[in-house]
Image (spheres, helix red, strand yellow):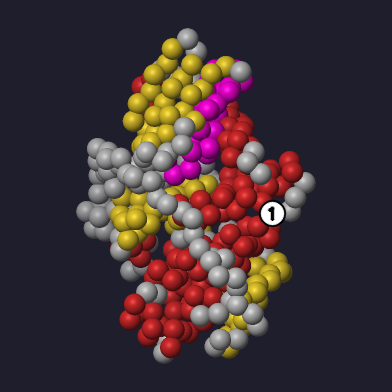
Amino acid sequence: MRTCPRCGVPRILTSEHTWLPNGTMTLARDVTHRMVFIDNDALNYTMDSIGDRLGVPLEGIIQEAKRKSGKHFMDAVLSGAKGVIARNLISTRVYDQLGKQVSMLGLGAAEVSSYKRHRYLDGVITDAYSGPAITGDICGAFESIEGRAAEATFEVSGGAVHCHIEAASERRPENDDASSFLPPPMVAGRNIYELCPVCKAPLSMGSQYAFDPDRGIIVDRKTDHRVVLIGVMTLSGLFGELEAELGRDVPRMMADIEKGRVRELIAAKGRDLDTSEAGYLRYMKTLELKGMGNGSSVSISDGTVRARVDNPYYEPLVAGFLAGFYEATSGKSAQVDWTSGTQGFSEVTIRPS
């Protein structure tokens, strides 16, 4: 069976990932490679909002950032003798397996429609999470498998993304694909998950998310929003590319956009929420299962909230997530600041603006 009969989570997902007690989720074969469940609607909304504010189309930046991260990921997967065999003897099977990975991660259902080794690949992705992003993912994988630079284009037709990847005639500049991502040190945690007795995944996974492996879709049952499972390194590369291209104001802009989105989402539910220190800690518990970090402490004094989040996946979005809760529950406009997570934690300060 492709999904666990007890909790409904795809078996490939549970076998390839590990949930740690410090609020992080990693690949089982590489604990340094963090993964997160992120709201795809929110991510697309953030990208669209930044593009609108700056008057700059982001498709090219997103596709290029995803190409780099896709190549880096496949280079790691196809390292050593396994990579030699895959690249030289069974490259078509690698693409078949890649399609299964795409589906498992909630990125859509991908199929190869035409392929010529070392020359080109045509793919069709139904229910794709993002046209430029999935095209970048596949282009990066093609470059890794075929061992040469490539160019990619896509179009949306009939509700599906049709991408064309073609080997380029020239090599990329040396170090063009080098990753600057350095994972910060991990802080220990004491989160305890009740595990599924069959597949050993956190039991709350099946109650939190609905999985449709055939369509390559994961839905958050609590919000009805689509989510995707994506690498922290990938997000860091995407956000870093945006900052490099568009300026240092991008992280602050992302925190502000996330603050407004969360505020409206909470306000729409119309429920009274606990705004005590214990209430904030419960709110931050929602980060853990997603692999986004571990809310470890909160203090409230004179209308100012100070929270510490261990192992944050991306500090500006964590800060916006907390500030949105503050604005929705207090009815006040908030100013939010945060510290870098280079020591394994970020301290977020929220005060009335």
43 above or below 297? Answer: below
Rendering quarter of residue 110? bottom right
Q: Mark 1 Cα within 10 Å, few/some/many (few <14, many 20+)? A: some
**Residue 330 covered by magenta stretch:** yes
Which residue appears at 22% of the width and 54% of the height? Answer: 197
Q: Is residue 113 left or right of residue 305?
A: right
- Tell me the magenta residue range: 312-337
Whether residue 270 can be seen here? no
**Whole-percent x and y of residue 61?**
65, 57
215 above or below 273? Answer: below
**Whole-percent x and y of residue 58?**
69, 54
What secondary structure prevails in the magenta region? helix
Instruction: Name the element at disc 1.
Output: loop
**Whole-percent x and y of residue 82?**
34, 80
Q: Is residue 343 left or right of residue 228?
A: left
Q: Amino acid at mark 1?
A: Leu
**Whole-percent x and y of residue 77?**
39, 70
- The residue under label 1 is 58
Which residue appears at 41% of the width and 41% of the height? Answer: 342
Q: Is residue 97 left or right of residue 249?
A: left
User: Which residue reaches farthest front?
Assistant: 174
